[in-house]
Image (cartoon, rainbow, N blue to C red):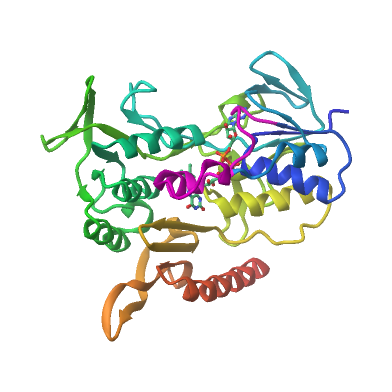
Amino acid sequence: TGGVVVVGASLAGLRVSEALRRLGYDGPLRLVGEEEHLPYDRPPLSKQVLTGDWEVERVALTSAEALAEARIETLLGSRAVAATDSTVTLADDRELNYDHLVVATGASARRWPGAASGGRVHPLRTLDDSVRLRAVLETGGRVVVVGGGFIGLEVAAAARHHGREVTVVEVAAEPLAPVLGVEIGGFFRRLHEAEGVRVRTGTAITRLEELEQLVTVHLADGTELHADHVVVGIGAAPNNAWLVGLGLADGGGVPCDHQGRALDNVWAVGDVAAWHEPAFGDRARHEHWTSAVDQAAVTAAAILGLEPSRPHEPPYFWSTQFDVNFQLVGRPDLATAVTVLERGETDGVPTDRGTVFGFHRADRLVAVATFHSPRRFLKLRRELQLELAAAIANA
Ligand code: FAD
C-alpha cells in the first residue's frame, strides 16, 4: 500500500508527519515539498530574520537526521501538480500512490500583477524572499510597502530597524482596518508614526512603474512616490489549484470537517484548509501558526481513528512590531462591533499599550485582542476558550 503521503513540507505537513509516528503509525510515510529547504518557520521571516537579529539557521523546524530517524521519507524540490483518489502526480511525472493524502500546501503571497521576480518589487513568503529582502534593507534606500496588513507593518518595522525611510500605503482608512477595524488600526498607525514610518491610508496604488534604478509608485489621488524598493504585502491565496481533479480547488481553501477530513481519504491542514468550526457553525481558513499546529495534531489522530488528545482550539494569532506585542484569539471576522474592554495606563495616564479589545457579535464575545499586554492576554485566552468549549457543548 502507499501509506500516507503528505504534500507541503512546512509547519503543518511536518507536524502531521511527526504526530503520525508519535501516535504509532508504522506504515510508509512520505513528505513532499516544493521548496529545496527542509521545513522551516515563517513568522521570524518578517521579524527576527529581517531585522538581522537571527541567523537563518534558527528558523529550522527539524533536521535531516530527525526526519530519517522518524522514518519520514522527505522529497524536496518536488511539486505536486495533480491528484486522483489514490495517486499524487509530481511535476517530474512521478506518481505516488497513497492510502491517505494530507494536503498541507499552505498559501502563496499575492503578487503585484506584472512585477518581474528578481527586480525591485518584492514578495515575502519564503526563506529565500526574506534573505533577499534583508540584503535590500541593509543596503539602503527608500522603501514603499504596499499594504498595511500584518506582513506589511512588520516589514515597515524591520525597515526602520535598518534605518530606512519607509512609507506604508494602505487603501483602507487605517492599517489593518479590514481585519481588525479602524480603532485598532489607529493604534498601529500611531505606533508606526511614532517610530518614523510614513503611513498613507485611504488611497489605492494604481501602478508600479519599475525603472532601472527606482520604482515610481502611482497613487489614485495623483501622488507619485519614489522608492528604491517596493515590498508587496497584499495577502496570500491558498495553494489548492492542483486538487482540481478531486473537486477541492475552491478559492476559499480546501473545505474540511472539524478534523480536517475533505474526502474519505483526503485531509487538509494549515493555511490551505478551511475547517468546519463547531463553536461558530461555519467554515474558516486561518493563516495562523498555532492553527496549523493544532490542526496537525487533530488530523493525525483522526487518520489513525484515534480521539485527538487536544480539542480544536479557537484560532490564535500574534504579531510583533517594534517592541509591541499584539495578540488575538477568536474570530474577529465575525464581529459586528469592537469595544475597548480595558484601557491601558501608566501612572494614571492613558496609554495605547495595555489596551484590551473585545469583538462582539450580538451579545456574544467572538474574539479578544491585546495591544501589548501579554499577561492579561493569557487569562483572557483561557476565558474565551472555556466560553467556546461551552458553546460547542451546547451546539
Ligand atoms: P506554509 O508554511 O505556507 O507551507 C506550505 C508549503 O507547501 C510550502 O513550503 C510550499 O512550498 C509547499 N507547497 C505549496 N504547493 C505545493 C505543491 N503543489 N507541491 C509541493 N509542495 C507545495 N502566523 C502567526 O500566527 N503569527 C505570526 O506572527 C506570523 N507571521 C508570519 C510571517 C510571515 C512572513 C509569513 C509568511 C507567515 C506568518 N504567519 C504568522 C503565518 C504562519 O507562518 C502560517 O500560518 C504557517 O506557515 C502555515 O503553515 P502551513 O504548513 O500550513 O503552510
Residue 376, image x, y percentages: 47, 76
In the orientation shown, which residue stands out farthest toward the top?
Answer: 93
Q: Residue at x 72, y 53 (%)?
A: 298
Q: Residue at x 31, y 54 (%)?
A: 177
Q: Residue at x 31, y 81 (%)?
A: 346
Residue 326 appears in the picture as rendered = yes
Q: Which residues are magenta?
A: 32-59
For the C terminus, the image quarter is bottom right
In the orientation shown, which residue stands out farthest toward the bottom?
Answer: 348
For the N terminus, the image quarter is top right
Left or right of 156, for residue 2: right
Q: In the figure, residue 106 lies in which quadrant?
A: top right
Between 374 and 37, the residue placed more toward the observer is 37
Residue 100, image x, y percentages: 78, 35
Left or right of 147, for residue 368: right
Left or right of 114, for residue 367: right
Between 68 and 353, the residue placed more toward the observer is 68
Q: Can residue 38 be found in the magenta stretch?
A: yes
Residue 314, image x, y percentages: 58, 61
Q: Residue at x 76, y 49 (%)?
A: 19
Q: Quarter of the picture for ligand 1?
A: top right
Badge count: 0
Between 235 and 267, the residue placed more toward the observer is 235
**Up/down of 34 relative to 231, above or below:** above
In the orientation shown, which residue stands out farthest toward the left?
Answer: 222
Residue 264 appears in the picture as rendered = no
Q: Can residue 6 be found in the magenta stretch?
A: no
Residue 28, image x, y percentages: 85, 33
